[in-house]
């Protein structure tokens, strides 16, 4: 188990966390590529949407591969657990559907849509929302938000972290070994 001492308790791999948020938007980019817009030729628009759907997810899967290959793991103590399944419904109805339904008839509409998407991506990143990537969901993973206990935890200064696991629940005070995708996002090992 790779447990380097002196690891800062702040968020590491901030770009990866942004990539994770961006990859959660991949269904929207797939829907946009199917729908298309009149102001941009399909060859460019579809290529761009497919790239935005595939590249962030590919980077995320590559980070998972690296964490497993380097055995970049942490032993984490579980405190209180919050399930994010309810947030997925908010995500679908508040974000995906309105963006998909918006008509883009002019360049002004297009730039307004891009700025709104950037604003939402920034808020998701800043508020630490790590929504499920569609590839992880297809592999049977769930996203749990964990608040660690204050005592007996090397990473207790981290206020919360995200655990990607195949389990539906984890018990309080349970110790979990997980691959580190970033300093606040972990994927449970061997589950």
Image: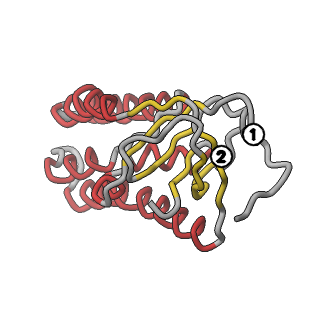
Q: Give 30 or 148, whichever is nearer the viewer.
A: 148
- Residue 156 shows in the view: yes
The image shows residue 134, relative to residue 62, as above or below, that is above
The image shows residue 138, relative to residue 167, as above or below, that is below
The image shows residue 159, relative to residue 141, as above or below, that is above
**Looking at the rendered structure, which numbered label has been put on residue 183?**
2
Q: Give 37 or 19, whichever is nearer the viewer.
A: 19
Q: Are marks 1 and 2 in contact (CB under 8 Å)?
A: yes
Give the residue at mark 1.
Answer: 9
- Residue 105 shows in the view: no
Location of the N terminus by quadrant is bottom right
At horizontal 84% and vertical 53% (from top left) the residue drawn is 5
Find residue 81 and report its horizontal and vertical position in percent.
48, 32
Sequence-first disc among 1 and 2: 1
Location of the C terminus by quadrant is bottom left
- Dot 2, how many residues are within 10 Å of its Cα: few (below 14), some (14-19), or many (20+)? many
The image shows residue 85, relative to residue 164, as above or below, that is above
Q: Give 174 or 91, whichever is nearer the viewer.
A: 174
- Tally the numbered discs: 2
Find residue 60 and report its horizontal and vertical position in percent.
48, 58
Find residue 116 and report its horizontal and vertical position in percent.
37, 28
At horizontal 60% and vertical 65% (from top left) the residue drawn is 67
Mark 1 lies on a secondary structure that is loop
At horizontal 57% and vertical 50% (from top left) the residue drawn is 176
- Dot 1, how many residues are within 10 Å of its Cα: few (below 14), some (14-19), or many (20+)? some
Left or right: residue 93 versus residue 125 is left
């Amino acid at each position: 188990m790779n447990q380097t001492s002196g690891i800062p308790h702040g968020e590491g791999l901030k770009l990866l966390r942004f990539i994770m948020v961006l990859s959660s938007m991949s269904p929207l980019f797939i829907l946009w590529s199917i729908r298309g817009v009149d102001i941009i030729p399909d060859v460019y628009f579809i290529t761009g949407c497919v790239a935005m759907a595939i590249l962030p997810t590919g980077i995320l899967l590559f980070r998972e591969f690296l964490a497993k290959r380097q055995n970049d793991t942490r032993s984490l103590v579980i405190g209180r657990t919050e399930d994010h399944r309810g947030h997925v419904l908010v995500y679908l109805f508040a974000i995906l559907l309105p963006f998909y339904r918006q008509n883009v008839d002019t360049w002004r509409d297009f730039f307004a849509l891009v700025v709104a998407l950037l604003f939402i991506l920034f808020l998701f990143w800043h508020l630490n929302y790590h929504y499920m990537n569609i590839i992880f969901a297809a592999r049977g993973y769930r996203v749990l938000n964990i608040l660690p206990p204050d005592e007996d935890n090397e990473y207790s200064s981290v206020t919360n972290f995200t655990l990607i696991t195949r389990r539906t629940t984890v018990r309080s005070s349970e110790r979990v070994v997980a691959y580190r995708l970033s300093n606040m996002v972990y994927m449970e090992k061997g589950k």
